[in-house]
Amino acid sequence: MKIFIFLFTGFLSFIVSAQPDIPDNLQIGMSFKAYNPELFNQVVHHKKLNQAAYESVHFQNSEWKTDVTYSTLPHKTDAVDLEISFICREGKLENASVALDLNISNWSSENYVLVPAALYNGNRYPYRRIRYSPKLMDPRDIGPDKGIIISDVHKLNYSDGPSFVQLRSGAMSTPSVCFYDSAAQKGFIMLTHQATKWGDNGISVTENKNRDEVVISVIAPVVRELYKYRIADSRYPSDDISAKFETGDTVKLRVRLYSFEANQLQDLFNKFAEVRKDLSGEITHNNVLPFSEAFHIQQDKFNRDNWVEEHGYYSVGMRENFLQDWQIGWTGGMISTYPLLFAGNNKTQEHVIRNFDWLFPNGISPSGFFWDSGEHGTKWYGGDIRKPHTANWHLVRKSGDGLFYILQQFLLMEEMEIAVKAAWKTGIKGVADAFVKLWKENGQLGQFVDNKTGEIQVGGSTSGGIVPAALVLAADYFSNPAYLETAEEIGNYFYTNYTQKGLTCGGPGDAMQNFDSESSYALVESYFTLYETTGNKKWLLAAEDAAKQFSTWVMSYNYKFPETSTYGKLGIEAVGAVFANTQNTHGSPGICTHSGLALLKLFRKTGNRFYLDLLNDIVHAIPQCLAHPGQKMPGVKDGWINERINTTDWLEGIGEMMYGSTWAETALMLTAIQIPGLYVIPDKSVFVCFDNLEARIAEDSKDKLVLDIKNPTKMDADLKVFEEKIAMLNQKIGPDFLLHANNVKIPALDSVRLTFFKP
């Protein structure tokens, strides 16, 4: 049902009576703006109207008519659709934009504002203007007990003064603004679309001086006034191109509004996870390269470009600087060795063993943690040597990653009957002990510790989000229950102080304590690992909470790249890209640096299809970004994956890429060994083809499920099939559960039929 309404003063009360869940403090309005591009889009004329439909609006040299369409949604009783049409009836309007405004009264700066992948709690925290790669500089900011301090990013003001953000639609994983009002126990979500024919939309949030009113606007086209955001700088001159409207032009802006009861902040994240794709349209994935072929390309690349024969280790990059030579964890050090050991040939496996011999014991610092980084095979560094005061600042997350992935490799070696040497065990046990010591002495893990003393230099954060999972593995491997006890204590600390507050920060080493996806996903792994080991359902609930929060970082739709851009020409699909953090505002091909296995485990335990679909989007985003003989990419070698799927202009430009080799290659290899190409539960008629193939039902009867699997790519596929019955879903699967998977070969451009019998 659609009702066309010419708004008048009483329109809002009509909405309230028709849809009681729509906030009664919300008024729909509109605005027109004209800009001076020579003054970096300074506003020179502005007309704001607190109703959304008028027969005649005069602005500058133009005459407009505006209509509103209000649509109820029978299947969504807590939602309403609004569309405002701006129709230019006479004249023309240059250097301008139009906007749909949501004017909200009874506002509070205590409201939690979520703009997915861009604002968490409004980014309403102290900040410092420090150029990239920012590290805290003022001694007053440094220490274990300081609060969250972010770099100069999009943010609502945490103190007095102007408080507003202006963003491109592509600067968020889903074009939307959400908030949680704890006083009223209400949640609110506004979804909208990427663009009109005039280009990407803008989305702004503007608070008044008293912080008791806010205006959420959808603007066509995006015009950021005076300034736009560029890496770690919110005051970069605006170069947005405004519109020229002429007689006959019509601009339509559409939003979907949800208003719902929310007893706690997590209810906002749960609702967002439910509706994030409601306006996404048809979702398509690029099936360009099977996992098996992608792994072969990556293995060749790592042996060709990353292997350092003189010293016997795989560098994390092309060794153009120390950070691209060696870093433990994070960017791939001792993570990439895991898939190379799992699926590599004999030569590759020999290289992995040499890598372990090279790392132990020389890679362990005096604190017991790993050395942070190094170069030339013999130089070990405590931290960022480019900044003298941080030369020994070790990112806690790096040693957490090292502990987590090396212990998994020990288990894999034992299954493969490869000896785990005493020196390796001694070194990794020392890392576990260092974490226990750090926790016992401080009641937190901090973000940066001194690599020589182990003392916290920068406190707080969820940088060590993976540490509980790593300590659970250590407890089992070394038969030491003290590690498990510490893991639970740390898990409780993270859940109470961060997850329940909708915050994860400090995972990346180059983004201060800006909110990030990397530690967000690490907590999913940790909480679920604690659940697997203890059986305590509070950890399962914590893992679900963390996973719903993590989903806010994942692109929910296929952003339309400019046709002239690199990604536009390559036909890259953005859905499933994982935004890095609120400073480095780009999507990435993959999770830094994990496969996403915990999402599959969550589905197995809960039966919630959401986790399968989220994982499917993420893993499909990666292979399309791999340069290989069948898909050459400008400026990069075969086997390289750049870490960016740019849907906003934070650095390289929309649809453009960085030219380098990155951790995303490791994420792809992890995906190839930990995520089944085809996952099937025949007695539930559930299947997902995670690989770059197509699966369709040929028959689904009470006795069997028959699937046709097509390989649409130009490469032969070696498909890993993981089949399980309902009765098996309660069984634990380890990280190496695909080591002996059933492999099905499917030639290029061919298909096979697979039959799965039901019990």
Image (cartoon, rainbow, N blue to C red):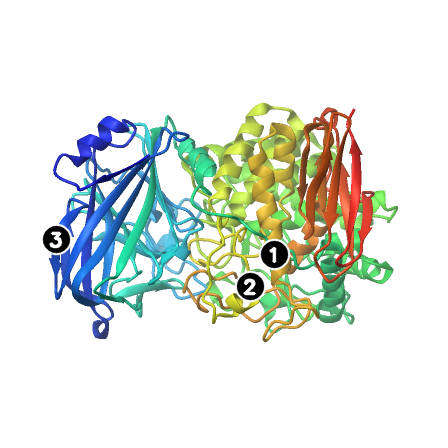
The crowding category of the residue bearing disc 3, from other C-alpha atoms within 10 Å (few below 14, some 14 to 19, many at least 20), is: few
Residue name at image x 47 percent, y 56 percent: 559
Q: Work out how far the residue at label 2 is from the one at label 1, CA to CA, in angstroms.
A: 8 Å
Judge depth for marks 3 and 2 and give the one in front: 3
Tell me if label 2 and label 1 are in contact, CB under 8 Å: yes
Tell me if label 3 and label 2 are in contact, CB under 8 Å: no
Q: Position of residue 726 (x, y in %)?
A: 71, 26
Is residue 650 left or right of 313 when viewed as pictured?
A: left
Q: Secondary structure at mark 3?
A: strand
Is residue 257 left or right of 450 when viewed as pictured?
A: left
The image shows residue 49, relative to residue 727, as above or below, that is below
Amino acid type for the residue under numbered disc 3: Ser
Front-lying residue, 143 or 238: 238
Residue occupied by mark 1: 286
The image shows residue 328, relative to residue 730, as above or below, that is below
Residue name at image x 23 percent, y 72 percent: 37
Q: Work out how far the residue at label 1 is from the one at label 3, CA to CA, in angstroms.
A: 47 Å
Residue name at image x 51 percent, y 44 percent: 520
Q: Position of residue 122 (x, y in %)?
A: 33, 46
Q: Earlier in the sequence, mark 3 or mark 2?
A: 3
Residue occupied by mark 3: 56
Q: Work out how far the residue at label 3 is from the one at label 2, CA to CA, in angstroms.
A: 43 Å
Q: Earlier in the sequence, mark 2 or mark 1?
A: 1
Quadrant of the rendering where the N terminus is positioned: top left
Residue occupied by mark 2: 571
Front-lying residue, 61 or 309: 61
The image shows residue 302, relative to residue 278, as above or below, that is below
Amino acid type for the residue under numbered disc 2: Gly
Amino acid type for the residue under numbered disc 1: Asn
Q: Position of residue 656 (x, y in %)?
A: 49, 68
